[in-house]
């Protein structure tokens, strides 16, 4: 996807004519995440919030209705493939608080995934989610890095201990 063109188009005043007013579950549209436009899928419509998935980031979030603005997604941008895939890092278990990844662990993982290029080595699927090792050009595995940083631990029974994360990098190889 030409992200520059996408972001320029939706940031331009002409895109204000694309404001979506009838927001329904299942709608694919565009909205901002951290000040930048991204493709969005509406998952839930609650009384004061929407639950949305930022398609190219792999992030699902609850947003306040009063604070969010959606724009219609043009067909050209809708046909482009997702820039994120759901995957599990094979052989590790993240350290969780009440069954959730802490914001510190999430931030550190996000920081680790900012460089690149990255390569994905698949290890099969469990419950329809791809199991992977992610490594960089120096063959340094993200799976090992997160354990060394104390964010996760190795597990002997790999197929039972996975946490779904979204691996986002525009440099990933497509599988």
Image: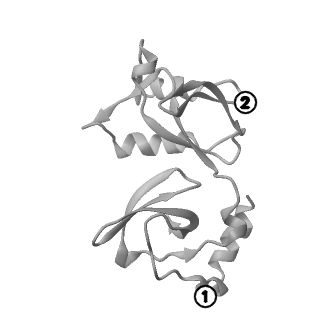
Q: Quadrant of residue 37?
A: bottom right
Q: Quadrant of the C terminus?
A: top right
Instruction: Please tell me whether mark 1 sits on a helix, a strand or a loop.
Output: helix
Please state if 56 lies on the left or on the right of 52 as rendered. Answer: right
Please state if 70 lies on the left or on the right of 141 as rendered. Answer: left
- The image position of residue 146, as x and y in percent, is 48, 29
Of all residues shown, which one is farthest toward the top? 156
Q: Residues within 10 Å of mark 2 (few under 14, many from 20)?
A: few
Q: Which residue is mark 1?
A: 17
The relative height of residue 21 versus residue 64 in the rendered view (above or below) is below
Q: Which residue is mark 2?
A: 137
Residue 35 makes an appearance in the image: no
Instruction: Please tell me whether mark 2 sits on a helix, a strand or a loop.
Output: loop
Residue 39: which numbered mark, if any?
none
Q: How many marks?
A: 2
Residue at 68%, 24% (x, y): give it: 139
Residue at 45%, 20% (x, y): give it: 159
Q: Quadrant of the N terminus?
A: bottom right
């Amino acid at each position: 996807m030409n992200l520059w063109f996408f972001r320029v188009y939706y940031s331009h005043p002409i895109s204000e004519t694309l404001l979506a007013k009838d927001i329904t579950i299942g709608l694919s549209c565009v909205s901002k995440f951290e000040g930048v436009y991204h493709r969005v899928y509406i998952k839930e419509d609650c009384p004061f919030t929407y639950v949305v998935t930022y398609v190219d980031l792999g992030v699902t979030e609850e947003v306040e209705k009063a604070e969010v603005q959606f724009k219609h997604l043009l067909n050209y941008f809708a046909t482009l493939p997702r820039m994120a895939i759901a995957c599990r890092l094979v052989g590790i278990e993240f350290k969780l608080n009440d069954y959730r990844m802490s914001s510190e662990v999430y931030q550190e993982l996000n920081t680790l995934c900012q460089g690149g290029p990255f390569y994905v080595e698949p290890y099969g699927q469990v419950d329809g989610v791809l199991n992977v090792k992610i490594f960089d050009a120096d063959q340094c595995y993200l799976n090992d890095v997160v354990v060394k940083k104390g964010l996760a631990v190795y597990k002997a029974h790999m197929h039972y201990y996975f946490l779904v994360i979204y691996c986002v990098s525009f440099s990933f190889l497509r599988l």
